[in-house]
Amino acid sequence: MSLQRLFTVLIGACLLAAGAGANAQTTPECDRSCLEAFADLYLDALAHRDPSRLPLTKDARYTENGIALALGDGMWGPEIVLGNYRLFFADPVAGQVGVYATLEEHGHPAILGLRLMIVERQIREMEALVIRSTARGTFSDIPNMKENPLLTAALTEPEKRPRAEMARIANSYFEGLVNGTDAETPFADDCERVENGVVTANNPSAETAMAMWKMSCREQFATGLTKVITNIRERRFPVVDEERGLVFTIIRFDHHGRNKSITWNDGSVHPVNSPFDEPFSFQIGELFKIVDGRIRHIDALVFPVPYRMPTGWVETGK
């Protein structure tokens, strides 16, 4: 999208909101097109390494991988070349928008997960998750970050669920993970999970070493293998895209590293292998596609961070 078109969309959204008249109370301040235009504007400014191009509130905040930075620091320093992949998810009710995008930093491939909060057509919150191949324990398949029509398709009315129920369903995934059970989470039979572009559930071509990736989402949870995760905290659900059935969450998975083995639900004992036998956490941005009340697809950005490191957006870090 050209910079001129970005400003045209933003200005048009402002005019529509201003002219809403009697419908002003029910018309979102910034609709899907408006929110996506802000995300595009941010990416354009990032590519130009010029945060002055962004309309910011006086109290605007920026974090990158959980660390509060001055806007212009961090990934704003390297030469950025944007890739061809962009996946938007928008929540006009909350005034928030997210995007997954591929890019290069000084020629090094990376994946960006970005969350923006828009208030009175200015950016108040900027939360960036950057998946870099140099991070210890990180795996990715950036070329596999391709458009998935399932994620951009609008739901029919019978397939939709209320906002609160969508968030509850997304949270049930975390409950199932930490409790090591499939009984708490409504999975679709063909549920697939993708992490950093790698298919890690319902992947028929997974190699023998990753045989568990061939299992469906439900089958994996049913084994109890996820008990290796010892805590899931700072559970936030900032973007609920009701039109497309998407919920974007940003959380921390903790691994306290105390156990040398775990017992699966069938009674078998399995060793806890590296790095899960050491204290560390995962920073995760997790996008759920919920259709007819069931999780159909999970698209996650995952990378390791220091044990119990906060996300930068919850004061207590609990």
Image (cartoon, helix red, strand yellow):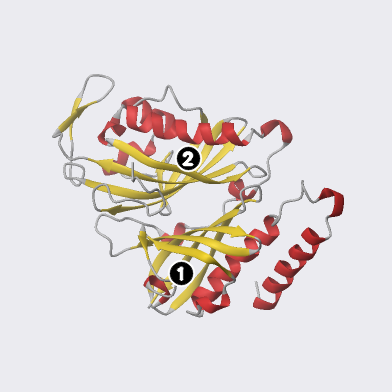
Front residue of 31 and 142: 31
Q: Residue 298: percent from the left, percent from the top?
A: 48, 43
Q: Quadrant of the C terminus?
A: top left
Instruction: Please say if 317 is above or below 166.
Output: below
For the point 42% across and 21% down, the residue is: 183
Q: Residue 279: percent from the left, percent from the top?
A: 19, 45
Q: Amino acid at mark 1?
A: Leu
> What residue does disc 1 label?
103
The 10 Å Cα crowd at callout 1, few under 14, some 14 to 19, many 20 or more, is: many
The 10 Å Cα crowd at callout 2, few under 14, some 14 to 19, many 20 or more, is: many
Q: Residue 154: percent from the left, percent from the top?
A: 68, 45
Residue 192: numbered disc: 2
Q: Amino acid at mark 2?
A: Glu
Instruction: Give the SS element for disc 2.
Output: strand
Instruction: Please say if 56 is above or below 213.
Output: below
For the point 33% across and 36% down, the residue is: 212
Q: CA distance from mark 1 to mark 2?
A: 24 Å
State whether residue 302 appears in this view: yes
Q: Quadrant of residue 77?
A: bottom left
For the point 50% across and 27% down, the residue is: 186
Q: In the shown orientation, is residue 38 left or right of residue 103?
A: right
